[in-house]
Image: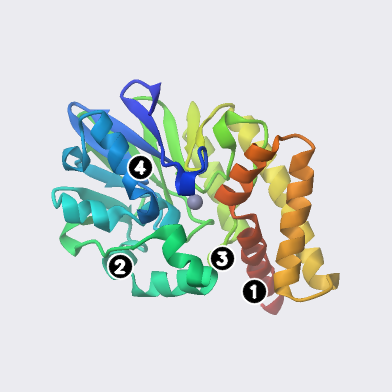
Amino acid sequence: MENIAPQTTLIDLEYLGYPKVIASCLLEGEGRFALVDPGPASAVVTLRRKLDQIGLGVKGLDTIFLTHIHLDHAGVTGTLVKENPRIRVYVHERGAPHLIDPTKLLGSAQRLYGDKMERLWGEFLAVPAENVSALVGGERLSLGGRQIDVVYTPGHASHHVSYIDQATGMAFTGDTAGIRIANGKTILPLTPPPDIDLEILEKSWELIQERQPERLFLTHFGPADGVKQHFAELRDRMEEWSITVEDSLKNGQGDDVQRAARFEEQVTTSLKRSLPDREIKCYVKGGAVELSWYGLARYWRKRHRS
Ligand SMILES: [Zn+2]
């Protein structure tokens, strides 16, 4: 547990035993408590232990703010609500139906992760409809007296929102602003299937910057300073990745599995120039680099068909 601002605590979910891969954030406003993206069900033991350590427990939670419903961000939500039916869950209206009935979501995750699904993500329980509040963007929510603005930021996922906390000036950007471990220099995009759309994503980056946040909070991993520089770097890297993936489709050899593996290898090699091995693991695991190839490949194939 690390205090990153007044009444704002980073919780390292120690995903599969690895530190600095998935972060949740605990917010307090006048004795009311919220988690931003509580994480995957496979990390529930760590989450529960850390909430117990500060004497709050799952029972002490009032609210969950979801940036989107991907398993690494939202997977444990149903488990927490089952234990504490008082919890109110905020999610974009396009994500809400899949939280209430996760059949489709789990089907598409199953296709991506196969028999590793259970070990990686644990059990995704449905969230009762009466606990879910659907967002469209533009809302101002309140946690005690603490005001949290909702910005619709699609591109990584069509149902992605970001939360701007008025108390700290922090923007909780989920996966929209990429991955950057512990405020380091390296910033990578997060572009897994099936929703990735680069033009839409760029617009979302603009929308976040228009709100002039002082800092970002990334699920992978933690607070990020120098917002303008962050997005400039992210844009450069995205352009590079986008070109690399498009090229691999045009003249790359082998099938998609080989192309994706080669892409991960290329990214890992370039990370090795500036990062120690244990940090590279955080980027490759948290960033799911191989999946990002598939996301961008899907985007380019769709573009070339139309
Ligand atoms: Zn994520």
Query: Residue 214: horizontal and vertical position, in percent?
Result: 49, 26
- Indicate which disc, 1 or 3, sits on the residue closer to the N terminus: 3
- Indicate which disc, 4 or 1, sits on the residue closer to the N terminus: 4
Which residue is under mark 2? 97
Which residue is under mark 3? 193
State yes or no: discs 3 and 4 in contact (Cβ < 8 Å): no
Amino acid beneath label 4: Thr
Amino acid beneath label 2: Pro
Pointer 1 local density, CA inside 10 Å: few below 14, some 14–19, many at least 20: few
Which residue is under mark 4? 46
Could you say which disc has been placed on residue 55 in the image? none
Whole-number angstrom distance, CA of label 4 to CA of label 2: 28 Å
Query: Residue 185: horizontal and vertical position, in percent?
Result: 67, 31
- Indicate which disc, 1 or 2, sits on the residue closer to the N terminus: 2
SS assignment at label 3: loop
Q: Nearer the viewer, mark 4 or mark 2?
A: 4
SS assignment at label 1: helix
SS assignment at label 4: helix
Which residue is under mark 1? 302
Residue at image coords 54%, 68%: 194
Q: Nearer the viewer, residue 237 or 263?
A: 263
SS assignment at label 2: helix
Whole-number angstrom distance, CA of label 1 to CA of label 2: 25 Å
Amino acid beneath label 1: Lys
Pointer 3 local density, CA inside 10 Å: few below 14, some 14–19, many at least 20: many
Whole-number angstrom distance, CA of label 3 to CA of label 2: 19 Å
